[in-house]
Amino acid sequence: MINLNTMFETRGLKIIVTGGGGVLCGNMAVALAKLGASIAILDIDPEKARQVVEEIARAGGDAFALACDVTQPESVRAAYDQIRNRWDRIDVLVNGAGGNHPSASTNKEVALFDLDPDAVNKVFALNFTGTFIPSQIFGKAMAAQGNGNIVNIASMNSVRPLTRIPAYSAAKAAVANFTQWLAVHMAQEYSPQIRVNAIAPGFFITKQTRFLLTNPETGGYTPRGQAVIAHTPMKRMGEADDLLSTLIWLISPGASFVTGIMVPVDGGFSAFSGV
Ligand SMILES: NC(=O)c1ccc[n+]([C@@H]2O[C@H](COP(=O)([O-])OP(=O)(O)OC[C@H]3O[C@@H](n4cnc5c(N)ncnc54)[C@H](O)[C@@H]3O)[C@@H](O)[C@H]2O)c1
């Protein structure tokens, strides 16, 4: 029988977290460091990445920050070179960089017909290509060492598109599709010990969702925020900590036969028909 005491062991893992300066993935980075993993925080905003590294250092953990634009192969390759100077292997890649932008959202003023295709491309590139490129570059190292774990951060939009955000919805659907594709490809072509899975968070109040879900004047929910709560059987928004146990499980030895899946962490949103 598997050792039940080490089934969820993540101590000593070398983990790259893209978008690790952000709310959800910064929290993941801090938690994994507290469990004894070493963390490379890659973020386009070096100041945010540095703040997470400081928080990890204050807790006695091991982390370093690298400025990196996940949509640019040369930027990710430069980060790879720096990581290789410090680590002899890469155990886990969390593809967390992502998000929507108001310029790629329809609203009362901007109809679908007026959306700027460049803004649409940018959001698509951040979420899809920004998952694809790190998976290529760090996945190649995993293929060479014969093991590894990739966790993509998908969304409820991966399952069914939400109103107003067509580029983000399409990109997160592509992330879900790519998770399955890459899981099969890595296992068949390189090693069954390389696993690829995704987490699909429900609704969390963070920088990218605040303007859609909350009203800064009243402090309450917008009609969209109220609709989310009405469609979430657990009747609340998610908290960053809600994602941790799923992440730990997916990257731990206990999940060694789990690949190609997407786990919703959504308070029941994706299970609820609305009736
Ligand atoms: N907040 C939610 O409700 C929610 C729901 C589902 C999925 N998600 C996904 O979770 C992930 C984290 O989201 P969050 O809510 O914590 O957002 P966030 O904005 O706090 O974090 C995103 C981070 O990505 C970084 N980033 C942006 N562009 C980048 C680039 N080109 N290269 C590298 N880093 C870049 C940002 O600087 C930021 O630190 C995203 O993929 C998001 O799409 C969020």
Image (tube, rainbow, N blue to C red):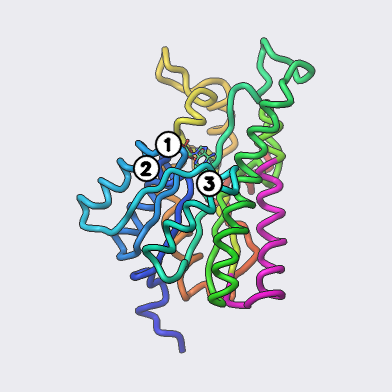
Quadrant of residue 192 within the rendered picture = bottom right
Numbered circle sitting on residue 75: 3
Numbered circle sitting on residue 49: 2
Location of residue 136 in the rendering, given as x and y in whole percent from the top left corner: 62, 58
Q: Quick check: can you spot residue 267? A: no
Q: Taking 125 as reference, is 113 left or right? A: right
Circle 1 sits on which residue?
A: 45
Location of residue 235 in the rendering, given as x and y in whole percent from the top left corner: 49, 38
**Considering only vertical position in the picture, is 148 above or below 110?**
below
Indicate the secondary structure of the residue bearing disc 2.
helix
In the rendered structure, which segment of residues is drawn in magenta? 171-194
Quadrant of residue 151 within the rendered picture = bottom right
For the residues bearing labels 2 and 1, Cβ distance under 8 angstroms? yes
Mark 2 CB within 8 Å of ligand 1 = yes
Dominant SS of magenta comes to helix
Q: Taking 189 as reference, is 205 left or right? A: left
Q: Amino acid at mark 1?
A: Asp
**Considering only vertical position in the picture, is 87 above or below 205?**
below
